[in-house]
């Protein structure tokens, strides 16, 4: 039975529209014009217990809105959702007790106090028994390497350190479902890696379901085998990350290093040239013909070096969002 | 029991924060003593020419002033820090974390913190109460004490509700920097007996901004001029305002979760 079930979820915002200029500003004090913005236009998907799924889409695609509806922060304008058997926006205590939402750009920790104090407040709020609290805390401290941070004021922590503490605060009650909205935002590469490892190990250890949004494809490729892609509030793709690349970017990249520049000029007859720099050439070859084309190149041109690669996932995704690729889930 | 435990945890953490800002206690104390001196000065001038103003003697006016300081201290200590924090949280979007806790949102939002140093005004208020009562040679027995406690508590509840209503408005308007001004300007009028104001203002201060229930009635209870019937009325007013403001808060929260981006 799926743990998260979303059917035809919709959300429309009423946005206040104001024209430029002082008189328009003055008018808007009394008469306001509103424009309806459809943020999520009927999205359906489901997640099984213990899955880690990446939620992809450009800014304004409706990712955060969907996450907020699933966490219970927003009422939808249409459709249904059920998480852990609860309707999220009813915000029943039994539900809130079992989920957590982490937002990379907002913090719940008290700014002027050491993180430990916020942990204690959460212990009281979530009614976590002392032994369970100590046990979870010790684990989180070990996994996230928090010992040197616990007694420092939150405001004196670096962005990455703060994020680690935020994660700990969000997981003290051992949620079964974890919504992560840009958890590595602004964090340096090393710390991003640590956070990813941590999310993976939490998921494995507790079998928690993780739905994650991120601008960093590395987060998604490292953590999620399955991705859900939304764009303009609509579902574009739902399936394996690997087949996403195959489906919307059905080509391979061939990089060549040739013996001389004259040979480099002749590669055009074999495949589409993406880049050419002296003796170095990058080609785009349709997936199905890749081995054939490579064989011909090898027999007819003086090759120094040759590599065949899948296009980077960033480029694939970028193509989807720019509307250059047609995807059918 | 659970509520008391939570309050203990909340207040313990806020007191730890406040220890960082010790200087605040002394600046508050000085500010409040200076304010006290100017107010007593103006009262003394007014009462120089008349032993009684609209039925109020200097001593009674002093009791009122004492309650004003006490109430000001209680508001600054328990109510204001939370209400200010809610407005910040609405602006910054961190109220989301409050909403997502498995606990009553209004309770968590409005009792999460306190400002221990603002106890300065509470202490000044208590000191002044003792002094003023001594000056009137009043005897404050258990009856007066109980009535005072009841009416003071009701007064706090009225302030809490009034402020909660204004804070709830930020769900729609997001930025309301002058909001506190409205509260403090209204509260300021309570420094003097409501009876000295013109009739229209008296009505406003009783029914619209119920300053009368916040300061005048508790002061009356302390100086033995308010009986159980008035105290009962103030309890009813307190219960009704808490109920109404709580309804409005829930309505605002529904709007917030229905439309915020």
Image (tube, coloured by chain):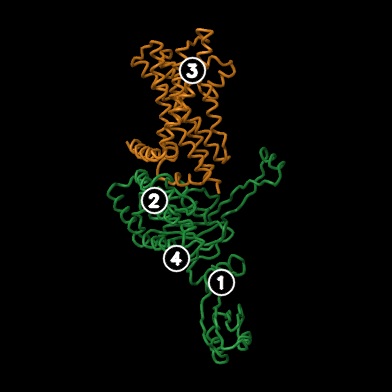
Chain colours: A green, B orange
Q: Tell me the CA gap for discs 2 and 3.
A: 50 Å
Q: Nearer the viewer, residue B139 or A234?
A: B139
Left or right of A243 in this view: B19: left
Residue A89, relative to residue A27: is it above or below?
below
Q: Tell me the CA gap for discs 2 and 1.
A: 39 Å
Q: Tell me the CA gap for discs 4 and 2.
A: 23 Å
Left or right of A175 in this view: B257: right
**Picture coordinates of residue A15, whole percent (x, y):** 62, 47
**Picture coordinates of residue A93, whole percent (x, y):** 40, 45
Q: Earlier in the sequence, mark 2 or mark 1?
A: 2
Q: Which chain does tag 2 point to? A: A
Instruction: Answer with the quarter of the image where residue B73 lies.
Output: top left
**Closer to the eye: label 2 or 1:** 2
- Circle 2 residue: A169
Q: Earlier in the sequence, mark 4 or mark 1?
A: 4
> Residue B40 — which label?
3
- Circle 1 residue: A248
């Amino acid at each position: 039975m799926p743990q998260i079930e979303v059917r035809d979820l919709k959300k429309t915002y009423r946005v206040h529209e104001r024209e430029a200029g002082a008189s328009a500003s003055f008018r808007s004090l009394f008469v306001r014009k509103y424009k309806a913005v459809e943020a999520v236009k009927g999205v359906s998907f489901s997640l099984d217990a213990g899955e880690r799924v990446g939620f992809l889409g450009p800014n304004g695609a409706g990712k955060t809105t969907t996450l907020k509806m699933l966490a219970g922060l927003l009422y939808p304008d249409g459709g249904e959702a059920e998480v852990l058997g609860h309707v999220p926006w009813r915000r029943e205590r039994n539900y809130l007790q079992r989920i957590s939402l982490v937002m990379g750009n907002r913090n719940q920790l008290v700014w002027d106090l050491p993180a430990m104090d916020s942990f204690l407040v959460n212990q009281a709020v979530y009614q976590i028994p002392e032994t369970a609290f100590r046990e979870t805390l010790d684990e989180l401290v070990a996994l996230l390497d928090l010992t040197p941070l616990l007694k420092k004021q939150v405001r004196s922590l670096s962005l990455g350190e703060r994020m680690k503490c935020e994660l700990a605060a969000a997981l003290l009650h051992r949620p079964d479902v974890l919504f992560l909205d840009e958890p590595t935002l602004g964090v340096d590469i090393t710390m991003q890696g640590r956070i990813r490892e941590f999310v993976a190990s939490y998921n494995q250890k507790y079998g928690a379901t993780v739905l994650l949004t991120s601008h960093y494809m590395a987060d998604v490729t490292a953590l999620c085998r399955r991705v859900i892609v939304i764009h303009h509030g609509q579902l574009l793709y739902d399936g394996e990350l690997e087949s996403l690349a195959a489906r919307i970017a059905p080509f391979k990249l061939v990089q060549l290093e040739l013996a001389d520049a004259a040979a480099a000029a002749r590669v055009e007859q074999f495949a589409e040239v993406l880049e050419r720099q002296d003796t170095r050439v990058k080609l785009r070859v349709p997936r199905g013909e890749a081995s054939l084309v490579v064989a011909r190149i090898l027999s007819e041109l003086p090759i120094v070096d040759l590599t065949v690669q899948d296009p980077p996932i960033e480029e694939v995704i970028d193509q989807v969002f720019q509307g250059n690729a047609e995807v059918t889930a | 029991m659970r509520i008391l435990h939570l309050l203990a945890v909340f207040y313990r953490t806020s007191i730890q924060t406040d220890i960082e800002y010790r200087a605040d206690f002394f600046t508050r104390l000085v500010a409040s003593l200076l304010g006290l001196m100017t107010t007593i000065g103006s009262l003394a001038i007014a009462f120089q020419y008349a032993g009684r103003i609209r039925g109020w003697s200097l001593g009674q006016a002093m009791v009122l002033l004492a309650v004003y300081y006490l109430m000001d201290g209680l508001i600054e200590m328990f109510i204001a820090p939370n209400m200010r924090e809610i407005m910040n949280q609405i602006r910054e979007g961190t109220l989301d974390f409050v909403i997502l806790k498995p606990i009553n949102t209004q309770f968590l939002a409005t009792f999460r913190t306190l400002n221990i140093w603002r106890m300065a005004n509470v202490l000044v208020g208590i000191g002044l109460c003792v002094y003023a009562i001594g000056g009137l040679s009043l005897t404050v027995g258990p009856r007066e004490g109980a009535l005072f406690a009841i009416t003071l508590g009701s007064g706090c509840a009225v302030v809490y509700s009034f402020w909660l209503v204004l804070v709830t408005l930020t769900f729609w308007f997001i930025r309301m920097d002058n909001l506190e001004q409205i509260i403090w300007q209204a509260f300021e009028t309570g420094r003097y007996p409501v009876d000295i104001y013109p009739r229209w203002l008296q009505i406003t201060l009783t029914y619209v901004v119920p300053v009368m229930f916040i300061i005048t009635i508790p002061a009356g209870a302390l100086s033995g001029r308010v009986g159980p019937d008035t105290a009962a009325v103030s309890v009813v007013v307190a219960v009704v305002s808490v109920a109404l403001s709580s309804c409005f808060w829930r309505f605002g929260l529904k709007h917030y979760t229905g439309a915020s981006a």
